[in-house]
Image (cartoon, rainbow, N blue to C red):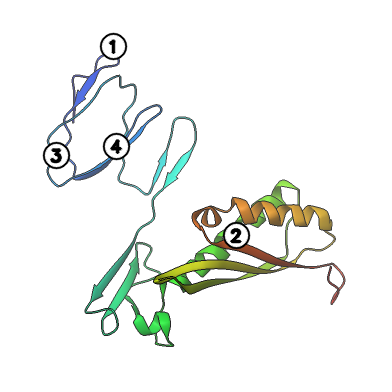
Amino acid sequence: MIQGLSGNDHGRCAVHLNIFRIIVDAVDARVSTSSLSQYTLTLLRRIEFSDSHQVKHQEGSIIMDRKATAVWSGGLKDGKGTLSTDSGVLKQTQYSFSTRFENGVGTNPEELLAAAHAGCFTMALSGQLGKAGITAQKMETVATVTLAKVGEGFSITKSHLDLVAHIPGVDKAKFDEAVKAAETGCPVSKLFKAEITVSARLVSQQAGSAS
């Protein structure tokens, strides 16, 4: 419900939504509240309300929101938890102290970060290769995320990406350039404060040969 929008770029809107997103030309204002009867914006040119995961700006940029939920019960060492994602890929997946620091059954945050980094980097590399007119037959990336004791606590100190790429007849220099761009440009790489390293092996057109 919108009231009082006028042609002089001033308006007042009465909103009856619990969670919504407001977008103006150069500003994103996110509001989440259980009881909101009115929200006022001045110098307003455009308002959009969206409850989806994707919002397209007027300039063509995209914002993506992805959600995961953690539930934990008990103490640190004797407690246990579950992880779930909106996509349903993870649904009350078990995690605990033993799955993180020992060899218990279930997942752990570092394993999920490794999966995210491997997936993000490999997709980013495919995009970089595409810009150079190159399409890989197959690329496989193993990410190793290191959790180490630093001072009084723990820190993620490193994420190492081990890549094997099967690309017939590709120029090695172009391949290396694409790998470097993907390493630094992948969104998950930008999220890490830890050291990021890549070992890339290019399998050439001839079977069994590598460069």
Name the amino acid, label 2.
Phe
- Earlier in the chain: of badge 4 and badge 1, it is 1
- Identify residue for label 2: 121
| x 23%, y 79%: residue | 75
Q: Distance from label 3 to label 1 (Cα)? A: 26 Å
Q: Position of residue 27 (x, y in %)?
A: 37, 31
Residue 32 image-quadrant placement: top left
Q: Position of residue 41 (x, y in %)?
A: 25, 25
Q: Residues within 10 Å of mark 1 (few under 14, many from 20)?
A: few
Do the residues bearing badges 3 and 1 touch, measured as CB atoms within 8 Å?
Answer: no
Q: Residues within 10 Å of mark 2 (few under 14, many from 20)?
A: many
Q: Distance from label 2 to label 4 (Cα)? A: 32 Å
Any mark on residue 36, and which?
3
Q: Secondary structure under badge 1?
A: loop
Q: Secondary structure under badge 2?
A: helix
- Identify residue for label 4: 49
Q: Is residue 139 above or below residue 79?
A: above
- Earlier in the chain: of badge 3 and badge 1, it is 1
Residue 196 image-quadrant placement: bottom right
Q: Distance from label 4 to label 3 (Cα)? A: 15 Å
Q: Position of residue 160 (x, y in %)?
A: 61, 68
